[in-house]
Amino acid sequence: MSAMKKSNDPFWWTLFGAGGAMTAMLVPMLLFLIGVATPLGWIEGPSYASVSQVMLHPLTKIAAFFLISLSLFHWAHRFRFTLYDGLQLKHLFQLIAVICYGGAVAGSLVAAYVIW
Amino acid sequence: MDSSSEYSLHHPKWHRHRTPIFWWVKRWVYICFIGREMTSVAVAYCAVLLTMVYRALQSGPEAYAALMSLLSHPAIIVLHVFALLAVLYHSITWFNLSPKAMVFRLGRWRVPDLMISGGNYAAWLLISGVIAWAYATG
């Protein structure tokens, strides 16, 4: 099966691709540390002071915003076509596109508000 | 028919082949395909989780401690194990397909697929190692 779905819109595909690459590189280890290893006591989580020192650094904030926003646009594009192909909802073409990309835009705005 | 074309309200009922919703469970490759696409839900969830971490950090040590204890709830850990499996599947399928999206040529020589996906895996290991080291050393 074709790896990348055909899309009329290179703009959305670029966001999908950038988000896919960035999340593939960063997210598994981050989720493993925060969501699994630390809660299970395999590793001791860093203190609030050191976490906030790293995470609230201006450059980290910018990187985190890109990671969050591109993750959401990656989801929006992929999930949109899964609904079309998987659930055979092609007749809801515009509604699904608006919900998916609109959700990603809204989520990015919320993330920006929370981060800064 | 183009899926974006307008429907008219009154048209003769032509024969349409209806595809059942669960068409993809019949073959393993289709299940893998839908599974790969659904990893995007886990990716979006991780974006929400990171936003929650930021909200806790901005609110202060008490909020951060409260979030950490919430993450220790057994049901949340189970959820995160499944999400982790999904994002791992996302990473592996992404790197395996990277040669299809990235084509490098040096003159007439095309860089082999294995070197491109291998380079991606190497970068993944390196980045993951740096993150783990930074996290463990505080």
Image (spheres, rainbow, N blue to C red):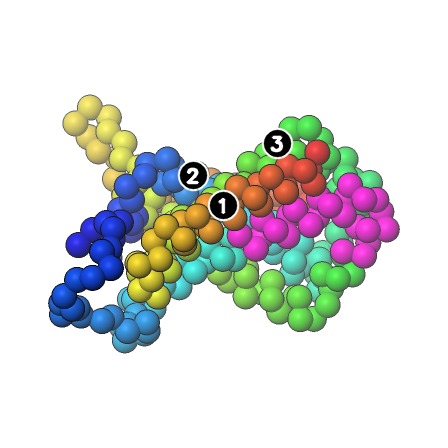
Left or right, A42 with respect to B82, comes to: right
Give the label on residue A15, or none.
2
Q: Quadrant of the N terminus of chain A?
A: bottom left
Tell me if residue A88 comes above or below residue A23 in the rendering: below
Residue drawn at x 45%, y 58% is: B39
Instruction: Read off the chain for label 1.
Output: A
Image quadrant of residue A64?
A: top right
Asked if residue A81 can be seen in this view, the reply is no
Kind of residue at disc 1: Gly
Decide which of tag 1 and tag 3 comes sooner along the chain. Answer: 3
Q: Residue at coordinates 66% horizontally, 34% vertically from top-left? A: A61
Residue B65 location in percent, x, y?
A: 82, 54
Q: CA distance from mark 2 to mark 3?
A: 16 Å
**Magenta segment includes A89:** no
> Whole-percent x and y of residue A79?
42, 55
- Residue at left offset 37%, top offset 50%: A94
For the magenta stretch, what is the residue range?
A: B44-67
Left or right of residue A62: residue B8: left
Mark 1 or 3, closer to the camera: 1
Dot 3 lies on which element?
A: helix
Residue denoted by label 3: A62
Looking at the image, which is closer to me, B27 or B11?
A: B11
Asked whether residue A59 appears in the rendered view, the answer is yes
